[in-house]
Amino acid sequence: MRLQTPVDGIDTASCEVRLSSGERLSYDNLVVATGARANGLDVPGTDREGVFVLRNLEDAIAVKSYLAATPCRKAVILGAGFIAMEMAENFSARGMETIIVHRGELPVARWDPEFSKIIRDEVTARGVTFVTGAVTAAIEGAAASRLALVTDRGTFDADIILMALGIRPDATLAGEAGIELGKTGAIRVDYAQRTSLENVYAAGDCCEVYHRVAHEWVSMPLGDIANKQGRVAGSTIGGKPLTFPGIVGAQSFRVFGLEAAATGIDEEGAAGSGYDPGSTIVWGSPVARVMNPESRRLGLKLVADRKTGKLLGAQAVGSEGAVSRINTLSACLWSGLDIDDVGYLDLAYAPPFSGAWDLIHMAAQQLRRTL
């Protein structure tokens, strides 16, 4: 293991990896697992002390060390994806005034606008300021605080600024070595994680993965996918071939008291994949109504193909029960079920966990009536 050792290049002709020290390491098999890079901003001041990205453990340690050493009263977060939502909760939990500055109008763009509004309202109800339609011009020093974020919607003082603007595959080394990249910019692989070059594999956020619903290779940088790809590559190299059959796109996060989860594809993605999508959103209780005196609400959206009734995607938002419903519907997508199947799934029923007709049943049956 060589830590703190950058790789300058891969010589696939001689099967060697060139290290920054000048040393060359030969290989019989090579695995490229370079991960992803956090997106930044091309504006002045991003290199100032107190400006961070959060991509890996080292980034997290740097943020925590800064907060421990520096009295911070105000935090500004650029972006409104998963990391932005989760860090807004963490900064708020430390008693810091927190501001999210976003180019768009709603957070977590994958979710239906109706659900994104619920997520936004949860964040603002907890005291976080949500600034929309803002384009950043610079990060400057400030007299009242350490930093100032300058935008076309005003200037926001901060003691710490987090750039949570998404990530991109780190496939530079692979591309320079002549390894084929996919249309996403990530490394193109097959079901055994082989790249376009013999004895060269790729795994994790740097490479593509097959989406079983969209029927295309996509970039979806998630830890569970990376773990599966790494196991497939290692086992295959070790003489016990495995294949990774792909994903259905399940994701989830929590922000304050809200669960949000999604799987499959939405209407736009479905149309792009050649389907004729229809959808419905239903609201109900995560448990039987007699067990829900506080009127907790759970929203569930289903997307299906009008021609075949095949389930294509699902999203859920609520105080509880969102992730468990999406996990169930991910299994349905994996198995290729249609909404008639979903509408009569045999689910474990007890009033503390759901009604006799679960929200999954009700959503599927309602969608069937509209197709």
Image (cartoon, rainbow, N blue to C red):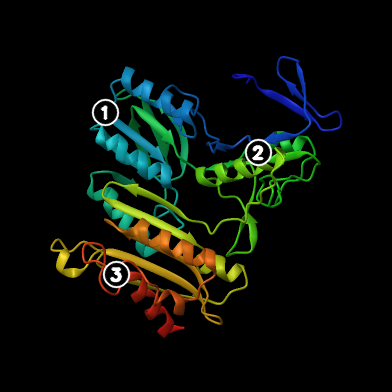
What distance separates the C-alpha of mark 3 from that of mark 2?
A: 44 Å
**Amino acid bearing label 1:** Arg
Residue that carries the numbered disc 2 in the rendered image: 234
Q: Secondary structure at mark 1?
A: loop
Residue 262, percent from left and from top: 43, 59
Determine which of the numbered discs, if any, sits on residue 73 in the image: 1
**Residue lying at 71% horizontally and 48% vertically, measured from the top left:** 188
Ranked by sequence position, the earlier of labels 1 and 2 is 1
> At 70% across and 18% down in the image, what residue appears?
20
The label on residue 283 is 3
Q: What is the three-letter code of the residue carrying label 3?
A: Trp
Q: Residue furthest front?
A: 240
| Quarter of the figure with residue 246 | bottom right
Residue kind at label 2, given as amino acid type: Gly
Compute the Cα span from label 1 to label 2. Answer: 47 Å
Most foreground residue, 34 or 339: 339
Q: Return the disc, 1 or 3, that comes first in the chain's sequence.
A: 1
As displayed, is residue 253 above or below residue 145?
below
For this view, does 166 lie left or right of residue 150?
right
